Image (tube, coloured by chain):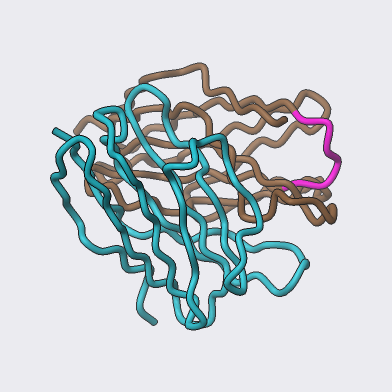
Chain colours: A cyan, B brown
Amino acid sequence: KAGVTQTPRYLIKTRGQQVTLSCSPISGHRSVSWYQQTPGQGLQFLFEYFSETQRNKGNFPGRFSGRQFSNSRSEMNVSTLELGDSALYLCASSHRIAYSMNTEAFFGQGTRLTVV
Amino acid sequence: AQTVTQSQPEMSVQEAETVTLSCTYDTSENNYYLFWYKQPPSRQMILVIRQEAYKQQNATENRFSVNFQKAAKSFSLKISDSQLGDTAMYFCAFMRGNAGGTSYGKLTFGQGTILTVHP
């Protein structure tokens, strides 16, 4: 069974630009969550999608947005990039059934975003 | 809101020895899950072990075991017979259980402990 796939693995963008990151969950997993990892702030929750709907959102500005498609693949978009957005962005998928207990999250290898 | 604290930024251990990583958390929830994740230099986050709060028995996975003290809100990870491949950043994480709320899928992480296993 293929794991969680994130593309691209590395990105370099300029301040003010926007970027879209992609995450393909494990087959059968309908929940996708996104996390930002930085040396200073550690791992912080961005948002979770389930059945194409955002179910939960962390404390990030509106420049950070996401969506989920009918095949459960998810994209995360960051607009008007700032230097502080440089981070490793991790995607996690889990096999969640409606509002039942979530199972453990399986992570992708992340996208390293550098804003210059 | 939940918080997770890992008070040991770095730890080191000799190969084949045992090491314990500490984690404390704060929550008013009664139904939740606790996890230990490992992140090696490759950056791939790997689940090491999980513990359901309603279970009194401590979870074990081969060389990895936890000491879950619910009243003290403590969740330590013991690694026995340490191997060079155990060198990684270890994160303790919390997830709310099925409370009908909006925290599904949200993991709250500690700051991490860098573990180095020396030959």
At horizontal 61% and vertical 28% (from top left) the residue drawn is B4
The answer to which of A64 and B52 lies nearer the viewer is: A64
Can the viewer see residue B82 in this picture? yes
Highlighted range, magenta: B27-32
The quarter of the picture where the N terminus of chain A appears is: bottom left
- The answer to whether B117 is drawn above or below residue A29 in the figure is above
Q: Is B30 included in the stretch rendered in magenta?
A: yes
The answer to which of B72 and A58 lies nearer the viewer is: A58
B67 on left or right of B40: right
- The answer to whether B119 is drawn above or below residue B102 in the figure is above
At horizontal 46% and vertical 52% (from top left) the residue drawn is A65
Q: In x, y percent, where is residue A95? A: 60, 72
At horizontal 77% and vertical 67% (from top left) the residue drawn is A100
Q: In x, y percent, where is residue B91? A: 47, 37
A30 on left or right of A91: right
B103 on left or right of A20: right
The answer to which of B85 and A80 lies nearer the viewer is: A80
Q: Quadrant of residue B82?
A: top left
Q: Quadrant of residue B105?
A: bottom right
The quarter of the picture where the C terminus of chain A appears is: top left
Q: Is A75 included in the stretch rendered in magenta?
A: no
